[in-house]
Image (cartoon, rainbow, N blue to C red):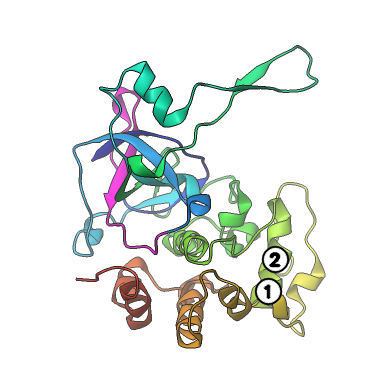
Amino acid sequence: MERGTYAGRGEWETTSQCGSTEDDHDCAESVPSALPSPSPSTEPAIVTSAEDEEELDSDELNEHDEIEMDNLNLGAVMWGMKSIDECDTTTVYKHFGQPRQFDLGKMWKRGDLVKQITIPEKLREDKIYLGDFGMAIEDGTAVNTKVQRPAMFCAPERFHNVNPSFASDMWSYMWIFAYLYLGFYPINGCGADVLPCMVETLGPLPEQWRGSFKYYDVPGEDGWYDQSRVPVDHATWMSMVARREPAISQEEQQLAVRVLNKLFCYEPTRRLSAAQLLEDPDFLDLMGRYVSIS
């Protein structure tokens, strides 16, 4: 499998198996770059080295059907980067600039931190990698902490004492897809604040979930389950897609909304699986407008 050094962030995930993390390397799986090209401000992290490359296609997905990642988020999606192993210090500084420090402010003792580098566009490769499998679990494994942070990537059932599943991973996948497509967060918020954002976009949470909300010591709100509520105009998928830049045709807006609705469903059993999504006509139509679909 892929091994790489990369910049990433953590949270629970449920996707394909990546193998071990021996030799103190993190694992990463290579996938085709079948996503609309994001702007620099919405790019995933970048892999700085990778070996033993393996690309996955739809036929191989069935071989990786027992591992759940429990924390799929933007930090697990990385661009490949051209190697700088042979570059001397002067060349590295030309690419990234010299290390810069900034003051951490008032603390118990003085300290500073090296500023994160920005990867130049010219060093980026077209291949995208999935990684950060440190919290991968076998399908069906019960976990004590159902919601992992950043909470905005988590499916709504995870806030209602439900274990991670392939269906919850598909919610997280579509969050990432929507972010890359729209150029902004489709569902935002920290911790329990994610739930009212979901309600504004999708309408009320299922009535049968009332009373099962669990997120640390934060109380749930009855208003989330009020079945008379409707989505807020400025927060609907159509409103978000219409704000996308560059602008797209009304026909593509309707297509994108249909794709979003196939996975942003409160009921996990209604979400398309990964295999179903790869065969879905609307998804293939939308993807085909940006990349070649073989």
Q: Which residues are magenta?
A: 18-37
Mark 1 element type:
helix
Rendering coords of residue 6 (x, y %): 40, 35
Rendering coords of residue 265 (x, y %): 54, 74
Label number found at residue 197: 2
Q: From the viewer's perspective, is 72 left or right of 195?
A: left
Rendering coords of residue 200 (x, y %): 71, 73
Which residue shows up at 56% across the image and 61% down it? 155
- Classify 10 Å Cα crowding around label 1: few (below 14), some (14-19), many (20 and above): some
The reply to whether residue 173 is in sight is: yes
Which residue shows up at 43% across the image and 38% down it? 119
The reply to whether residue 208 is in sight is: no
- Classify 10 Å Cα crowding around label 2: few (below 14), some (14-19), many (20 and above): many
Q: Earlier in the sequence, mark 1 or mark 2?
A: 2
Residue at image mark 1: 235
As drawn, 75 above or below 59: above
